Image (cartoon, grey):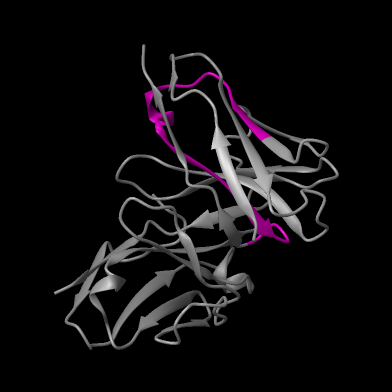
Amino acid sequence: QSVLTQPPSVSGAPGQRVTISCTGSSSNLGAGYDVHWYQQLPGTAPKLLIFGNINRPSGVPDRFSGSKSGTSASLAITGLQAEDEADYFCQSYDNTLSGHVVFGGGTKLAVL
Amino acid sequence: HLQLQESGPGLVKPSETLSLTCTVSGGSINSSSSYWGWIRQPPGKGLEWLGNIYFSGDTYYNPSLKSRVTISINTSKNQFSLKLASVTATDTAVYYCVTQLYGDHATSWGQGTLVTVSS
């Protein structure tokens, strides 16, 4: 049971827009902590995709965008491409039990 | 360009201690903005943060594993290490070493190493 809740899977056709949600609570996203997103391509280590809710590291296409409001956050991918097929994880900080880093359970994106 | 590389046994017996080392290259482990952490991923499952350490030696652990986890740092070798005691089959996972900016998001990841707990 992950502290942050993500849908297990989403799908879309090439060129479409998809969103992945990440729902938390008053002890993490609702407390104002930032959300970050990672992309994990099959057989590889995760890669930072979005940090500080909305920021893209150098090299990440602007097709990827993030948002956060209250206890929820979203990752949006526009102009879906076959190479976007991967697992996506959200991450934040939770202030219970002396505080610690927490992840969502992950969402598998299928490009149809 | 910062690179991290995990090393250690790929097979550990139940009840024993899992030990891994991460070697950092392309940058200094003494960076004032970086925390050095461990994240694991059981086969086919999600990510779990184990803890991290600052170059000063200050450590932060996942409360659910705190009693079994020890992270240490060797600044002279640009390495940091993980020890997980009393392992069981549920500790079987790919273990990643990472650098966390200000202890938060992980900006660089090692390639990961699979550790299997089995007799």
- The residue lying toward the viewer, choosing from A49 and A8, is A49
Which quadrant of the rendered structure holds the C terminus of chain B?
top left
- The residue lying toward the viewer, choosing from A103 and B76, is B76
Q: Quadrant of residue B61?
A: top right
Magenta run includes residue B91: yes
- The residue lying toward the viewer, choosing from A77 and B64, is A77
Residue for point 82% across, 50% down: B30
Q: Residue furthest left?
A: A112
Tell me: residue A30, above or below residue B112: below
Tell me: residue A31, above or below residue A8: below
Q: Position of residue A108 (x, y in %)?
A: 27, 63
| Residues drawn in magenta | B81-104
Horizontal side, residue B30 vs residue B52: left or right = right
Count up the numbered dots. 0
Horizontal side, residue B56 vs residue A32: left or right = right
Residue for point 36% across, 17% down: B118
Q: Quadrant of residue B76?
A: top right
Which quadrant of the rendered structure holds the N terminus of chain B?
bottom right
Magenta run includes residue B78: no
Q: Position of residue B105 (x, y in %)?
A: 60, 62
Q: Quadrant of residue B27?
A: bottom right
Residue for point 74% across, 56% down: B34
Tell me: residue A79, above or below residue B84: below
Horizontal side, residue A86 vs residue A25: left or right = left
Residue for point 77% across, 48% down: B29
Q: Residue furthest right?
A: B56
